[in-house]
Amino acid sequence: MSPQHVQPRIEEALRSRNFSAIRGLLADWVPADLADLIQRLEPEERGVLFRLLPRVPAAETFEYLSPEYQEDLLKALGREHVAAILNDMSPDDRTALLEELPASATRQLLTLLTSEERQIAKTLLGYPEESIGRLMTPDYLAVRLAWNAQRALEHIRKYGHDSETLNVIYVVDEQGKLLDDLRIRQLLLASLDDGIEELCDGHFVALKATDDQETAVAVFSEYDRVAFPVTDSEGFLLGIVTIDDVLDVAEEEATEDIQKIGGMEALDEPYLRAGFGEMVRKRVGWLIVLFFGQMLTARALGYFQDEIASALVLVLFLPLIIASGGNSGSQAATMVIRAMALGEVTLQHWWIVMRREVLSGLTLGVIIGVIGFLSIALVAVLTDAYGASWPLIGFTVASSLVGVVLWGTLVGSMLPFVMRSVGVDPATSSTPVVATLVDVTGLVIYFSIAAVVLRGSVL
């Protein structure tokens, strides 16, 4: 039964303090569904329900909760209960929780850990923020090169319950240096007398503990693995990173990029948890920058006020010109930024991208320009709205659309390269920034063409 359907029965049982009924309802639930249910309850009900869970399922359920719900539960639970949860959590999930908390809270929680778990937690927290070391767990299985398959399988049966995953087994030497990795199926299908060395091919991919977490995302995207080993600079095995943690990083990075593309700084917390002051602070900076950018648009209009006064009909097409340039620039910027994020495009590809976008912009501009001319022609024939000079007006608008769309596409595609070259996140060249730049230059293109084409007739 889904959390949505059972939630009313759980809430009723909580109100009536029928705890045995709650235990019966949740007996067969998996941790992910339990976490979903807890997050749907009222704050005062979450702690009560969580205390009813057995110790091991409670720790596993806690790992599935969002950070904000984890923090709320830690405040609601007693010291002994918190200590049990923290000690039973997997090291990587515990690190993710501790690094989200204030330093004072982290120090208090570290005192609740056993000496062994505290040492593991301090080691992982000692790695740089957003490094792979913060994601890894020391719960893995390693076998020696000199063993045979039988001894390796016996080792797995004895210690496998403590491992984060059994899909991949790592081969190390006597000092703990990583030599290879083996999929578990290789051991299961091998003869018991086969030596581990016979199963190894020496080809493996390892991550460095000090590398950025985005490196892990790229490696997992390229290779078909559920986990990768993490080593130090000399190749000694320190731990592993699993796909679930990397997916969380990928989601965070995508969210950050989307927020930046929208014309704001990335939020440090989920939307509903972010304070009013933070929401304003993260958004006001770019709004001010864009406001002053739009002031240039007003200046451009003032520069062409004589042309506008002479031919008010030109004003009718201003939204069309500005929107077309901004839209084409936003399209190009979005495509290039995403291609950079996926590693498909680097700084060395700028010339290839520019050639492609010039051709694309020109083609798109011609298509939009033809549509614009035909629209003006249709209105002129049916209503005589533009007078006898409608062909020149149509040509002016069509030519301007070609120029503005081409220019917008070029600016949108090249600005991310400029940002990357000066060490700024390309996502910062967001669509509002591109649109603002193209607005100003689009007006210059439009009225410049109008001044040439319509001089002596409308102007």
Image: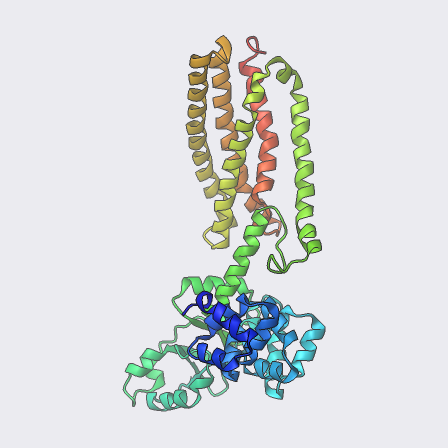
Extreme residue toward the front, this view: 16
- Asked if residue 96 is positioned above or below residue 214 in the image, the reply reads below
Quarter of the rendering containing residue 269: bottom right
Q: Nearer the viewer, residue 331 or 108?
A: 108
Quarter of the rendering containing residue 102: bottom right
Residue 126 visible in the snapshot: no
Q: Position of residue 346 (x, y in %)?
A: 50, 51
Please give left or right for residue 122 compared with residue 244 in the image. Answer: right
Q: Nearer the viewer, residue 78 or 241?
A: 78
Quarter of the rendering containing residue 273: bottom right
Number of numbered callouts drawn: 0
Residue at 58% across / 34% down in the picture?
438
Q: Position of residue 390 (x, y in %)?
A: 48, 13
Please give left or right for residue 285 compared with residue 95 in the image. Answer: right
Q: Position of residue 311 (x, y in %)?
A: 59, 14
- Asked if residue 378 is positioned above or below residue 172 in the image, the reply reads above
- Asked if residue 26 is positioned above or below residue 415 in the image, the reply reads below
Quarter holding the N terminus is bottom left
